[in-house]
Image (tube, grey):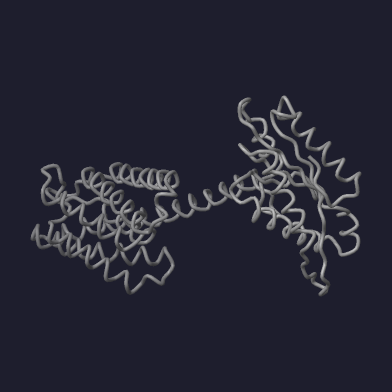
């Protein structure tokens, strides 16, 4: 029996892993709460059926499994709707499938599901571990009564319920720990993934990702590269301090993103350097966007922490691919050369 209990526990952990791996693969589709509840209910019901099929044989016709633990975890980490849907699926299995293990009668399972649901309404504000222990205890007590009535032997019922509450409590606590670990690991992974592609200060793409976008340009994919530098930014930092410099970088980034929108790929490629890649656009369209950026920054001011109105200007260089460059690397060099010319001509202007 102990080995079979261990197998059930391993299956539960496996199901938790499968549930979250699939969930994170289809995060966009599950953004709708109703879809997430539907997903959680179907998965919980399916896993509950499998765990019922492999229920542990305790005594003659007495079986117990971890189906309710799966449903309790669905209630705690998904929604009430997912719990009810999963419970309904399990009820249908017990009622109509010849393969169902008689862990509880349909009527008894209805009582257990209702008892756990009502108990959760009272204890849902508790921490996850005491909440789970209470819900398992409610399920075990009703399971004990069900076995006692069915087998007409409360001594057998007590033994089966004792094993059940031990296995279920350990499994629920371990399951919660596994879920918390997986959630923290996923959050860390998402953070690291974002940090590897996004500039932490401005929220724009970083240089590595932008260069990968450049290298991926096809030979027949006309594109425009815009390079932009904030004029005299070192002087600005020396005058107002680096914290104000960081705030200014955020302001510039926000204005650039508002103008470019989804029409281009925008990145911060250095301290005060920015790059914009426009695919399928003409030089005239790029020039118009660049001029809008330049004029917007020239004519705007923001307030420093000391209460001063400050602003910056930018110099911009533009190059076209494949019109002015035979490769993405040469495109960058060409745009950088035009940016250099814009600076030499007095800054605060666009050169293409």
The mark tally for this picture is: 0
Residue 95 in the image: state x and y as whole percent.
11, 52
Q: Nearer the viewer, residue 350 or 332?
A: 350
Please, is residue 200 above or below residue 321 in the view?
below
Q: Quadrant of residue 6?
A: top left
Q: Residue at x 82, y 66 (%)?
A: 310
Say which residue appears at 67% left-offset and 44% top-offset.
285
**Is 335 positioned to the left or the right of 15 in the image?**
right
Would residue 238 be found to the left or right of residue 54 on screen? right
| Quadrant the N terminus occupies | top left
Residue extending farthest front: 284
Closest to the observer: 15 or 205?
205
Residue 37, percent across and down? 33, 57
- Which quarter of the figure is the C terminus placed in? top right
Q: Is residue 246 left or right of residue 86?
A: right
Q: Position of residue 137 (x, y in %)?
A: 29, 65
127 sits to left or right of 253: left
Residue appearing at x 82%, y 38% in the figure: 338
Query: In the image shown, does 70 or 352 lie closer to the viewer?
Result: 352
Q: Which of the pair 69/223 is nearer the observer?
A: 223
């Amino acid at each position: 029996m102990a080995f079979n209990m261990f197998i059930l526990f391993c299956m539960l952990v496996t199901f938790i892993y499968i549930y979250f791996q699939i969930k994170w693969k289809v995060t966009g589709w599950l953004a709708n709460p109703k879809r997430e509840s539907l997903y959680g209910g179907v998965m919980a019901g399916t896993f509950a059926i499998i765990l019922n099929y492999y229920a542990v044989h305790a005594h003659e016709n007495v079986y117990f499994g971890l189906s309710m633990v799966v449903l309790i975890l669905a209630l705690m980490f998904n929604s009430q709707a997912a719990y009810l849907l999963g419970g309904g699926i399990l009820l249908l299995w017990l009622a109509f499938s010849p393969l169902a293990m008689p862990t509880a009668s349909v009527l008894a399972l209805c009582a257990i599901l209702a008892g756990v649901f009502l108990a959760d309404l009272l204890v849902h504000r508790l921490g996850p571990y005491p909440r789970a222990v209470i819900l398992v205890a409610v399920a075990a007590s009703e399971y004990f009564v069900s076995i006692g009535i069915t087998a007409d032997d409360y001594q057998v019922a007590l033994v089966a319920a004792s094993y059940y509450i031990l296995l279920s409590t350990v499994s629920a606590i371990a399951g919660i720990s596994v879920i918390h670990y997986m959630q923290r690991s996923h959050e860390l992974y998402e953070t690291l993934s974002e940090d590897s592609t996004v500039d932490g200060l401005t929220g724009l793409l970083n240089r590595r990702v932008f260069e990968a976008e450049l290298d991926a340009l096809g030979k027949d994919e006309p594109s425009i590269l815009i390079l932009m530098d904030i004029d005299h930014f070192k002087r600005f930092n020396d005058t107002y301090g680096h914290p104000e410099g960081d705030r200014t970088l955020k302001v510039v980034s926000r204005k650039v993103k508002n103008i470019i929108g989804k029409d281009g790929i925008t990145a911060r490629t250095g301290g005060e350097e920015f790059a914009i890649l426009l695919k399928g656009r003409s030089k005239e369209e790029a020039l118009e966007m660049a001029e809008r950026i330049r004029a917007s920054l020239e004519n705007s001011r923001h307030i420093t922490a000391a209460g001063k109105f400050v602003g910056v200007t930018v110099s911009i260089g533009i190059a076209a691919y494949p019109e002015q460059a035979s490769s993405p690397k040469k495109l960058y060099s060409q745009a950088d050369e035009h940016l250099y010319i814009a600076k030499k001509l007095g800054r605060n202007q666009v050169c293409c």
